[in-house]
Amino acid sequence: MSIKQLLSALCITLCLCLGVGWVLVFFQSTATVRYTLAEQHEIVPGGNEHGKDIASQESGNKGVQPVFNPPALEDAPEGIREAVLLGYKIMMDTPTYAGEYVGNELSCRNCHFDAGRRRDTISLVGVAAVYPRYRSRREYSADLTLRTQGCFERSMNGTAPPANSQVMQSLKAYYFWISKNIPIYSDIPWLGLRGPVLNDYTPDPAKGRQVFQAVCSRCHGQDGTGTPIAPPLWGNGSFNDGAGMNTIKHFSDFSYRFMPKNGPMLSKEQAMDVAGYAQAQTRPHFVASHPNRVEQVISVKGEE
């Protein structure tokens, strides 16, 4: 073989080696990119590269951020639209639409502004996505029926609507409709109260009375028993002593975050003081209309 032929053979061999090397590098980097995309979107077999697939959603919706965007009531499916609309009316004017279960002058909207469809309130948007859940009051898992029955007994100072009543079924249809598109058991930042607003603070009812007279009485009346534009905060027309709002924890948080309505202005100390003042007032005594705790007769402890 001549030197010229030998050099040609070497050149061909080198080109082949470079080509094979480039191919290997290309496929390796492509696999790395695809793997990175899969990590970012949690793609598993059967999924897609635009977001999480069904399997990853069922694993707990980790990383999914719920969006506060309650749907219009009139957009509810035809089969449940009547129930959804009635549920809304019950929330807005409870004595009129569910009067047989109400024992005071309150409506659900007094704590759940616009029937719970506003974010600056004790919102109900997404509540159907987090129940059933453990309730210390029940000492067990509780669904929305039990939760709502407790509200009627305590906040409404009334009796619990039966699970199969039109009132209860309409309220649940409403809860589920306004919770549309909220991922099941996701972390929903706008739900519930957080309080107390100050942990190391002892409320001063005397200062709270001053706050009430200067700020709250404009809407709730000088004696706190309500006016045409705001509900009673104590007395026979208000929630009873078993209600969650009859605690410094909840009353202070609600007052600090949402009061006065549409223009919260209380300091944390003022919210705590006015909560102490409100709790010192007289109100109806809670009387349960059905068992408070879930009867636990079946044990699963020690079973696989």
Image: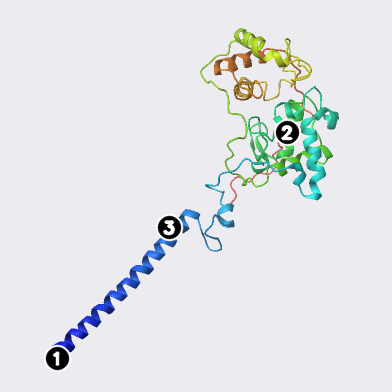
Looking at this view, name the residue that lies furthest to the left. Answer: 3
Q: Which of the image's four quarters has the N terminus?
A: bottom left
Whether residue 256 is visible: yes
Q: Which residue is identified by label 1? A: 2
Contact (Cβ within 8 Å) of mark 1 with mark 2: no
Residue toward you, 146 or 223: 223
Vertical arrangement, residue 273 with respect to residue 22, above or below = above
Instruction: Identify residue type, mark 3.
Output: Thr
Q: Position of residue 216 (x, y in %)?
A: 67, 15
Residue type, numbered disc 2:
Ala
For disc 1, the neighbor class at 10 Å (few under 14, some 14 to 19, many from 20) is few
C-alpha span from label 1 to label 2: 94 Å
Residue topped by disc 3: 36
Per the rendering, the mark at residue 115 is 2
Name the N-terminal-most of marks 1 and 3: 1
Display coloring? rainbow
Nearer to us in this view, 287 or 240: 240
Amino acid tagged 1:
Ser
Of badges 1 and 2, nearer the viewer stands: 1
Q: Residues within 10 Å of mark 2 (few under 14, many from 20)?
A: many
User: Is label 1 in a helix, a strand or a loop?
Assistant: loop
Which quadrant of the view contains residue 8?
bottom left
